[in-house]
Structures are given as C-alpha cells and as structure tokens.
Image (cartoon, grey):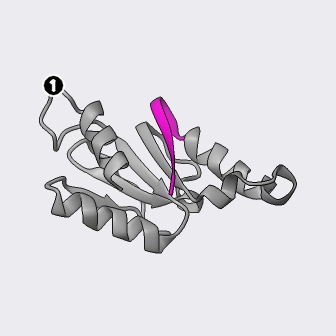
Amino acid sequence: MEKSLALVREWGAGSDPENVGSTCVIAESKKTRDAVAKYFQTNGLKSSVIDENQNANLNHDSIYFSTMHRAKGLEFDRVVVLAPKSYLGDPLDTDSKRKLIYVALTRAKKDAALITV
C-alpha cells in the first residue's frame, strides 16, 4: 500500500495532494480495494470507492478505488493496478488473470503502474 500511496503523491507533485487528476487504484477484490481506500484516507487523501452498480461520476478532487472487473469501460488519467503475485505465475495457469491486469492497465490515458502485492 505504501508504494501505491507514494506513487499517487508523486503523480500529484507540484499540485495540491488532494487534486491529482483522475486517478484510480484498481485492486483484484473488494476487500483489497476497501483496505487501500481506507489507508489512503488515513493518510490524508480524499477517497471514493466505485461500486458495482454505481455510475462513476469522475471529478478531480478524489482518488478513486475500483476492482478490476468494475473498472472495465472506465478511463482515468492515471491508474495504479494492485495485483497478487500469483496473477503473474505460469502463463498456462494465469491467462485469464493476466487479461484482467491488461484491461485494468489500459484504463489509463496517461500513466499506469503495476504493483504486485
């Protein structure tokens, strides 16, 4: 979580730390998504969780948090993808997981980062 927070802060360098553009942290599960969102909040960043049935009305005053499945079809300036190391294991066993990572990374218009957890 520390790496993702540092990266988001770096991307927002030179501006108000709460105004880092449309940035989304994408996790593999709701549990991880919610834990990371809480971590960001406790470190002073405004956080918004994008739930399954919620319209994503994006503005630039918040860091967004989504699951890989919910992020499909959305676009952000910057994306941090948090993926379990197991998703990058043997290609024969992890093909569908690698595709999820690809879809998550391609949600970024400017910058993207993959962090294994």
Percent coordinates x, y for residue 42 in the rendering: 17, 63
Specify whether 64 is left or right of 101.
left
Residue 111 lies in the magenta-colored region: yes
Q: List x then y, in percent, for residue 114.
A: 52, 43
What x and y, as percent, mark residue 16?
Answer: 12, 36
Residue drawn at (29%, 50%) of the image:
63
**Image side of residue 38 versus residue 83, left or right:** left
Which amino acid is tagged 1?
Answer: Gly
Whether residue 23 is situated above or below residue 34 in the rendered picture: above
Q: Residue at x 48, y 30 (%)?
A: 109
User: Does the magenta run of residues contain 23?
Assistant: no
Q: Is residue 104 above or below residue 65?
A: above
Q: Which residue is mark 1?
A: 14
Looking at the rendering, in which quadrant would you find the N terminus? bottom left
Decide if residue 54 is in sight here: yes
Q: Which residues are magenta?
A: 107-117
The reply, left or right, for residue 6 in relation to residue 88 is left
Q: Compared with residue 2, is residue 75 higher up or lower down, i.e. above or below?
A: above
Q: Residues within 10 Å of mark 1 (few under 14, many from 20)?
A: few
Please state the horizontal and vertical placement of residue 59, each as a whole percent of the image: 27, 45
Residue at 44% across, 45% down:
80
Relative depth, front residue between 19 and 112: 112
Q: Quadrant of residue 33?
A: bottom left
